Amino acid sequence: MKVDIKKLAELARLIRYYILLSTTEAGSGHPTSSLSAVELMCALFFGGIFRARLEDPAYPNNDRLIFSKGHASPLFYALYGAAGVVDEDEIKTLRKFGSRLEGHPSMVFPYTEAGTGSLGQGLSIGLGMALNAKYIDQLPYRTYVLLGDSEMAEGSQWEAMQIAAHYKLDNLAGILDLNRLGQRGETMYGHNLKEYEKRISSFGWRTILVDGHNFKEILDAYEKAADTKDKPTMIIAKTLKGKGISFLEDQEGWHGKALSKEEYEKALRELGQVDRFIRGDIAKPAEDYPAIPKQSPAEELSYSSKPLATRKAYGLAITRLFPEFPNMVVLDAEVSNSTFAETFKKKYPDRFFEMYIAEQNMVGAAIGLSSRGKIPFVSTFAAFFTRAADQIRMSQYAGANIKFVGSHAGVSIGEDGASQMGLEDIALFRTLRESVVLYPADEVSCERLVEEAARRKGNVYIRTTRKDTPILYGAQEKFPIGGSKTLKESAADVATVIGAGITLFEALAAYEELQKEGVAIRVIDLYSIKPLDQATLEKAAAETKAIIVVEDHYAEGGIGEAVASALSHIKKTPVYSLAVRKMPKSGKPEELLNYEEISKEAIVKKVRAAITHEHI
Amino acid sequence: MKVDIKKLAELARLIRYYILLSTTEAGSGHPTSSLSAVELMCALFFGGIFRARLEDPAYPNNDRLIFSKGHASPLFYALYGAAGVVDEDEIKTLRKFGSRLEGHPSMVFPYTEAGTGSLGQGLSIGLGMALNAKYIDQLPYRTYVLLGDSEMAEGSQWEAMQIAAHYKLDNLAGILDLNRLGQRGETMYGHNLKEYEKRISSFGWRTILVDGHNFKEILDAYEKAADTKDKPTMIIAKTLKGKGISFLEDQEGWHGKALSKEEYEKALRELGQVDRFIRGDIAKPAEDYPAIPKQSPAEELSYSSKPLATRKAYGLAITRLFPEFPNMVVLDAEVSNSTFAETFKKKYPDRFFEMYIAEQNMVGAAIGLSSRGKIPFVSTFAAFFTRAADQIRMSQYAGANIKFVGSHAGVSIGEDGASQMGLEDIALFRTLRESVVLYPADEVSCERLVEEAARRKGNVYIRTTRKDTPILYGAQEKFPIGGSKTLKESAADVATVIGAGITLFEALAAYEELQKEGVAIRVIDLYSIKPLDQATLEKAAAETKAIIVVEDHYAEGGIGEAVASALSHIKKTPVYSLAVRKMPKSGKPEELLNYEEISKEAIVKKVRAAITHEHI
């Protein structure tokens, strides 16, 4: 394609004008981090490289662009301004309350692929999109990720790098805007491009070094990237932070600072005549559509009467449900024989992706897959989701639809000890806006809750148990999100014991024990921890003298606090919490449940105390 | 030193015996992952390389050994068995309730430097210890980290690698036990040592390739590592998982499995005659002691009447307090001009370490520094501590003494938008066992709480605010951990409003507004979120009709739940929560506090409703 470099230069000038205009109007933002990548992005967009229907951002075969350096949002918005889909009035609303142009790209702006702003996450998201294009939808769209040099210090980048090379993602390109300066000074390697080149190429990527302000070199690199087979490409571009404005260019002390009105006027004079009416054209994408996946009803749930661990039920459930949810993709972090994601892998190897022990990248990739319409089921040990807590946090700002499944929850895993015990996973997933947190106790409820999760749009966490647990429910039982099951109930109930997962069986055992003494308790299976079954909780609070929540999780942010908080606005029955409070250690599951005082014995003791004293 | 290779082989046989014995007795554990590294560790310990006083594990100049592959704990304990400080009876208690020999190394075993078991963390911890030796205590001790090949997929490894090279840590050596097999199958690169070599050397490390079962090659590598200047060394050892037992060697399906009694007998026959009474000698460490740091009283706190952001007060506080706490070390993740750690850096550049945008490694390094007696103050944006949530989780199992300081908390940061807002940081730090969570509202309380944090042994989180806030307290005011300040109180109080940090000022403004209507409210500054001031909360519950908690944080796991939970066991006044519940966005701080209904207006509205209705 013949590219008009002169026109690109004019568009670059317009983009610089928008960057300066928007940040000066906002009084904050990152003009200098935006200015360094103007030529890189202008060439991509208007040099015939990037192919998209801007009138249809959801079009499946649009090329994808992710600003991993999300603070360069003024450039991001300016590109769409120069493309004619954001006008100058809107450009001036940057960072204002109610604007689509937020401080970092967010989903209210229709061209944002995934909210960014926490550094080092964009490459994983792009990897997910590229995986989708190459292995699932088999489409020719390409994914581009703009990266900053400071964020290359994040380990997540290198996780993404290794996995992208492992899966030979030749449809993925990184553009490294190497402007030398971080927030508070120079990066570790400054303008030494070779330092980046040797690291990145050692990870199996093609590397192309360019002058990031030279359109010809940049366009040439993009073409080479598109022609590269079997490996991703990193375009390593030497740039100047603040490029184009002499008093900003390559200067320290200008990170995240807007210009004053005077500085702005001075900058505009340097910029010269801007054609405010010039607009750039973007290439058309291919006409390919993904094949619409064939949907067929899942097989009926069948199970034996034998106890089965919910982690095993999870593996069975996703395998059974795939025909009904053909957009499902399963990812696991090298523990599929523990989480039982391997059950799915054996039947549908093409829809399973081994993500190795790199949880951050696994979750980032799931965000990318989710944004391309897939339903990623992502599993590892519950404890190890903390490794990806920031990616999980950011997934809520990407509007993601991910099903997180954490196995090996609580002290009941036994001998492996504290490091392997998920004891803060409920707290982690509860903090996500509009998340769902589910905790099945038996095989049937696990199967049904996996189904509910697949049907639900949005982030869901399912907590599974290592040990086999007895079957509690019949196949016809329904488990709506936000529901609960009252397993023991009578007019004589003196207290309510709320359990979930492994502790439900302790509650049921306590019920039997107390029955012998003529003491009746209500037992509730709170399988839906978020949202909670408010009506059933309030009924129990009204009808019994005490509520005792027992959980294999730390007290903070767990089920006890969720229940206490749900009932805190009404005058009521006291809520007591039995939770993990002592230093967890190795031992048999039963020993540890006893030691932490979350076993049958502890429940019985607490019920007795609750019904004889006001305070305990 | 002349090394008796024949004796090393005898010791290796004893170590293998202990590994098989302990895991078979336990009925679980990781014999094969232990067997692969027997020669590597046996040579280190008994080949004259590792120098330590085993009778004094706290001796400052002992060499340090961290099992990053913590699941190889049977080998770890066996080494100390062969050294004569753990007897065979204790070896047989592996993984049993109450044993010092837990499933993964924990602090109850006196030779554990830091609890491990979450992979990819040991190198960062070792880096912290090596930083201490080279730059702070200036001691000749060396730090060794045993790494697995599967865990090299974790991004945290590459964070540690780059920073160790950046700080030229020639006193740090990694030993990569490249046994080819992960948990569920082969790693990405199998036995291809070159793949690791090119990546690791590109990150600035010296690499030495060895046959990991050949004592001579191993000893030679350790000597080269010790002689290397200005860069860390990675010994990349080709090993066989299950080495020494033919039916385990290099076989899939044997990860994390103990042998049956029959298999054990068979393995012992292959092992041949074991000298159960042979013991190895460990070299003596140097006599160097660290200089005892000179302690002198901190200057008196001085401040002007002008409003000041608590993040700035934090910078002033650590700078003022350093003379009194000369074990302080300050780390920051490339945002020291936002967290104001730079205030300290300017005065004490030798005690400040720039950790770049690599939060996982920063926290891991802090664990290492803490274990060497330092008091690390670690800062970044509150939101970005989620990036290191797993390292933070593991720090509690390392008995760490880290002061985490998160700036830019809540929606009140304004225009930058959701990605930069710490909205789950309180929940994150509350889940840590025995942690302290502090949230100062003004300059004086921030100064005092930093002082309390420095004095306290254990993990503390301090949440700071971006905006300037007015001075509330006099210099003589005390802020004990677990306390609170009742700022407005009268016999006529109808409701209690609990704020902390930024929302305290909204509560005070609501007080003024309600005063005009003749409505009196109690206002409490809950600066200590964990532990809570239980007595003051109970008093407020007894004396006022409603408690309203207002916080710039998501509802889940936050201050509202902490208070609801603290008061849930007594029949009481309702507790209402005003917290961040809508999708956060860009805007002015005031606009966002209003939008989220955590501002003065929302408080006034809630108070009015609370005193007129039972239910709201």
Image (cartoon, coloured by chain):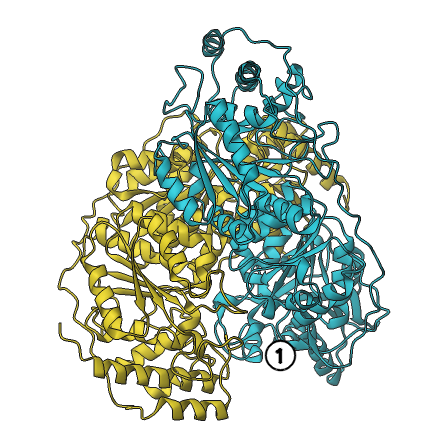
Chain colours: A yellow, B cyan
The quarter holding residue A346 reads top left
Quarter of the image with the C terminus of chain A is top right
The quarter holding residue B448 reads bottom right
**In front here: B565 or B90?**
B90
Residue B125: image x %, image y %? Answer: 59, 44
Q: Is residue B255 shown above or below B147?
A: above
Residue A273: image x %, image y %? Answer: 31, 93
Q: Secondary structure at mark 1?
A: helix
Q: Which residue is mark 1?
A: B601
Which residue: 67% across, 38% down? A583
Q: Residues within 10 Å of mark 1 (few under 14, many from 20)?
A: some
Q: Is residue B60 shown above or below A563?
A: above
Residue A250: image x %, image y %? Answer: 45, 76
Amino acid type of the residue tagged 1 in the rendering: Glu
Is residue A214 in view from this perspective? yes
**In front here: B182 or A244?**
A244
Say left or right for B65 vs B290: left
Query: How many numbered tags mark residues here?
Result: 1
**In front here: A109 or B22?**
B22
The chain to which mark 1 is attached is B
**In front here: B451 or B576?**
B451
Say left or right for A399 vs A215: right
Is residue A473 in view from this perspective? no
Quarter of the image with the N terminus of chain A is bottom left
Say left or right for B525 vs A227: right
Which residue: 64% across, 67% down? B342
Residue B152: image x %, image y %? Answer: 44, 41
